[in-house]
Image (spheres, rainbow, N blue to C red):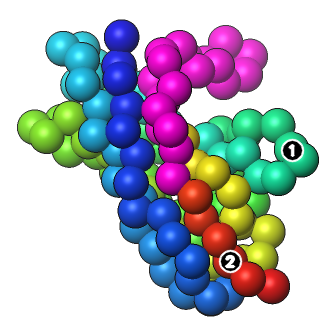
Amino acid sequence: QVQPVESGGGLVQAGGSLKLSCAASGSRFSVTTMGWLRQAPGKQREVVAAISAGRITYYANSVKGRFTISRDNGKNMIFLQMNSLKPEDPGVYYCNALKYEYSWSPVSSWGKGTRVTVPS
């Protein structure tokens, strides 16, 4: 299992940038698809970006072209560079190990997440 610890959230004005980090323990990190999930107020948690062991990436349409996911297997970390932030981007961002079978499913335990606030 991957045990994630997220960091890097904060308050940023619309149009600004923020970079989230996730440190994940677990011996199988380098062969695990990892992703970032966002839980906006009153909404279900959704996958916004994912990266496979082979660094194939997936982005939700709402963040495509603005967010970039990356990983550093040597440090057991993944990152989410968020540019051109919009008022609809706020929420608590979590990282988790993911599997895909018709849809994305988180497969590991949850961290506390990191909150992103974009004042409208």
- Name the residue nearer the viewer: 81 or 65: 81
Circle 1 SS class: loop
Judged left or right of residue 103, residue 16 is: left
The residue located at (51%, 26%) in the rendering is 110
Q: Give the x, y percent position of residue 89.
A: 71, 66
Report if residue 54 is visible in the image: no
Query: Quick one: label 1, few (<14), some, or many (20+) residues within 10 Å?
Result: few
Magenta stretch contains residue 98: yes
Q: Is residue 85 above or below residue 93?
A: below
- Name the residue nearer the viewer: 30 or 38: 38
The residue located at (13%, 40%) in the rendering is 75
Q: Quadrant of the N terminus?
A: top left
Residue type indicated by callout 2: Val
Magenta stretch contains residue 109: yes
Judged left or right of residue 67, residue 51 is: left
Q: Is residue 71 above or below residue 9?
A: above
Q: Quadrant of the C terminus?
A: bottom right
Query: Quick one: label 2, few (<14), some, or many (20+) residues within 10 Å?
Result: some
The residue located at (57%, 77%) in the rendering is 11
Judged left or right of residue 75, residue 53 is: right
Q: Which mark is residue 43?
A: 1
**Residue on which the image places disc 2:** 118
Magenta range is: 95-114
